[in-house]
Amino acid sequence: MRTVTAVAHRGDPYRVRENTLPSLRSALALGADAVEVDVRLTRDGVPVLLHDATLKRLWQHDRPLSALSADEVRGLTAGGVPTLVDALGQSVAGRLMIDLPGADATTVRAVLGVVRDAGAEERVYYCAGARAMLMVRAADPAAEIALTWTSLAPPRPTLLDAVRPRWLNYRFPLVTRELAARVHRDGCLVSAWTPDTRRSMRRLLDAGADSVTTNRVDLLTPLRDE
């Protein structure tokens, strides 16, 4: 029987502020198999959970994360922005899908180092575009990778050979039965993001998606378990 992985996008953001420890806990309590989180570095090289390059949208401080130390981020957000170390400690009931927006080699080394030091390699996998995932693969030959792909045209065989992804990670409107069948023939699993309605989720399940990333994991898990 096919098993579909339910991935909570940034936690449970409809109820709890995204990329925070309470949001991770809420998503896991709702039955998420994994939580997708975004990781960036502070000025002093600490990996923390934040999607945007600044604190403005979520924390009302128009300050770039790259200009702030981890202690300054903690002070400005009253401890609301967790470190990756904190998040790994909260996700023992599930996995973390680490997205690396705007990552460079320094970010990749820092993130993989934290995961390694925590002994969490089996509980973590990585997603982003080809550039970041090539860096992850170079840094860790055993890393599990979901290569984010935004085109109906398939990735070049040379890229697949270099990245060796387990998953191809598509925007959900692109996923059809035909695309899923092609990806499966190529030896990968299909991941889709981010449908937030039951109708879209049902369509993906019927199309053969192996993993669905959503802001509404509370809707997904009952559908997945039917």
Image (tube, rainbow, N blue to C red):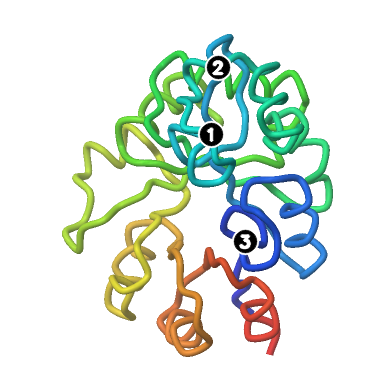
Which numbered marker is on residue 13?
3
Q: Do the residues labelled 1 and 2 touch (CB within 8 Å)?
A: no
Up-down relation of residue 198 to residue 161 (above or below): below
Q: Which of marks 1 and 2 is in front?
A: 1
Q: Where's residue 205, x and y in %?
A: 50, 81
Q: Which amino acid does label 3 sit on?
A: Pro
Q: How far apart are marks 3 and 2 (CA)?
A: 25 Å
- The residue closer to the viewer here, 140 or 224, is 224
Q: What residue type is labelled 1?
A: His
Which numbered marker is on residue 110?
none
Q: How far apart are marks 1 and 2 (CA)?
A: 11 Å
Helix, strand or loop under label 2:
loop
Q: Mark 1 points at which residue?
A: 61
Q: Which amino acid does label 2 sit on?
A: Leu
> Is residue 172 left or right of 115 when viewed as pictured?
left
- The residue closer to the viewer here, 58 or 13, is 58
Q: Name the residue under label 2.
A: 68
